Image (cartoon, rainbow, N blue to C red):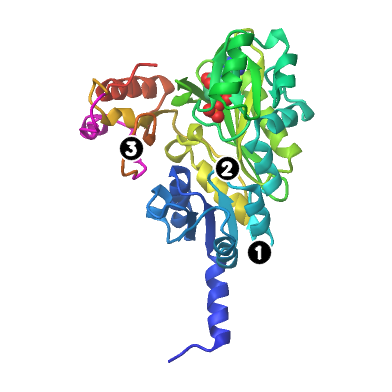
Amino acid sequence: MTLSAADEEARAAALRMHTVGVLGGGQLGRMFVHAAQRMGWRVLVLDPDAEGPAAQAADRVLRAAYDDASALDQLGRHCRAVTTEFENVPASSLHLLSRRTVVSPAAGAVHVCQHRALEKAHFEASGVPCAPYAAIESEADLARVDAALLPGVLKTAQLGYDGKGQCRVTDRPELARAWRETLSGRPCVLEALLPIRCELSVVVARGAEGSLVHLPVQQNLHRDGILAVTQVPAPDVDAATAQRVARLAQRLAESMAYVGVLCVEFFVLEDGRVLANEMAPRPHNSGHASIDACDISQFELQLRTMLGLPLVTPRQHSPAVMLNLLGDLWFDADRLQAPAREPDWPAVLALPGVHLHLYGKAEARRGRKMGHLTVTAASLAAARATALEAARRLGLPAF
Ligand code: ADP
Ligand code: MG
């Protein structure tokens, strides 16, 4: 029996109602796919790599570049709403998609988060304090740099992540060399090197009708510019500081009329001041503990915001410590040989409250995020003790 054209159309429309799309195929996409499928949605992933972490889990993969007009058109036709797991999707692609379907977050907000200078201008316009900085796009900008910004951190305005595209500089000659040579004269921002006591982040979710919720404030430890450990609740700040950063993050979402999940990173300085560092227009590595420690994860929040489903404040039922598992763990101690071994998972899985997440990446590389491990327990002290033991068994440094 053949279906009539009208039947075909009705079937496609019904399928579309239950399908959502993701731009990007990394681990954030993979964990979004898991959350969406659990709630009954089909997920279509657009990624240039058909075998990446998200593609492995997706119901369907469109293998294409992020600016491929015909792939974007298909995504728009087949999906009731589309989100991104990767902030460097061209804003023009999101614009194009928004003519066909719901896009969350919107192109304008993603554009701000893609560019450090725009991002900082947005912090200032929203009354959210950030590090003293200067935008450097020319030799003239370089010559004008205020001495108070040195020593400083020079960061590419675009496409930096995990500490990549950053140089610490102590004086003007070093700054000039770093800008001209290391960062090839690309648009940059120079920030003063800050006396940081600790780092925090907050994941907020804002719905189209303006409702706002957030996950508990997370405390983050970075090693070599890469997130290494997240603890929730944040052990080293008082309730007033945690409340303040949550309010600032919400203010940033509101002032962009943001719809979706937004993560804001903060520095707490030695003198107690709180400064916004950067924003990600998507779930964030520091929010991964929410999968195992909260009754609503950051990925479920992402699904809820894009579909206009109710937002309720997630409740953290277990204190948690998350350890990032980088590719270095696959290498021998001398760090010179090709990946030789799988880390000793049975040794860490023998500990109570350990949740192992691996992203399905084929090849381990140093500094590459291969997975994470979340330890939950009845108290943060207990979660820390187990996480420290897990770190020891894996050969990771203590924290
Ligand atoms: P990325 O996009 O790579 O995460 P960030 O701007 O967040 O870039 O910088 C990565 C890390 O480098 C931060 O989490 C912090 O530990 C350190 N860092 C960044 N900027 C500064 C600064 N101005 N002063 C001191 N440390 C900094
Ligand atoms: Mg960062």
**Which image quarter is the N terminus in?**
bottom left
Q: Are marks 3 and 2 in contact (CB under 8 Å)?
A: no
Q: Can residue 309 be seen here? A: no
Picture coordinates of residue 57, whole percent (x, y):
39, 54
Q: Which is more N-terminal, label 2 or label 3?
A: 2
Secondary structure beneath dot 2 equals loop
Picture coordinates of residue 132, whole percent (x, y):
70, 16
Secondary structure beneath dot 3 equals strand
Which amino acid type corresponds to the residue marked 3 in the rendered image? Leu
Mark 2, residues whose alpha carbon is within 10 Å: few (<14), some, or many (≥20)?
some
As displayed, is residue 57 above or below residue 246? below
Along the line of sight, which residue is nearer the eye, 172 or 395?
172
Q: Is residue 376 magenta?
A: no
Mark 3, residues whose alpha carbon is within 10 Å: few (<14), some, or many (≥20)?
some
Determine which residue is flagged by label 2.
88
Q: Can residue 164 be seen here? A: yes
Which amino acid type corresponds to the residue marked 1 in the rendered image? Arg
Along the line of sight, which residue is nearer the eye, 391 or 107?
107
Q: Nearer the viewer, mark 3 or mark 1?
A: 1
Tell me where residue 271 sits by quadrant: top right
* Region rendered in magenta: 336-360
Q: CA distance from mark 1 to mark 2?
A: 21 Å
Label 3 beta carbon less than 8 Å to ligand 1: no
Determine which residue is flagged by label 1.
100
Which amino acid type corresponds to the residue marked 2 in the rendered image? Asn
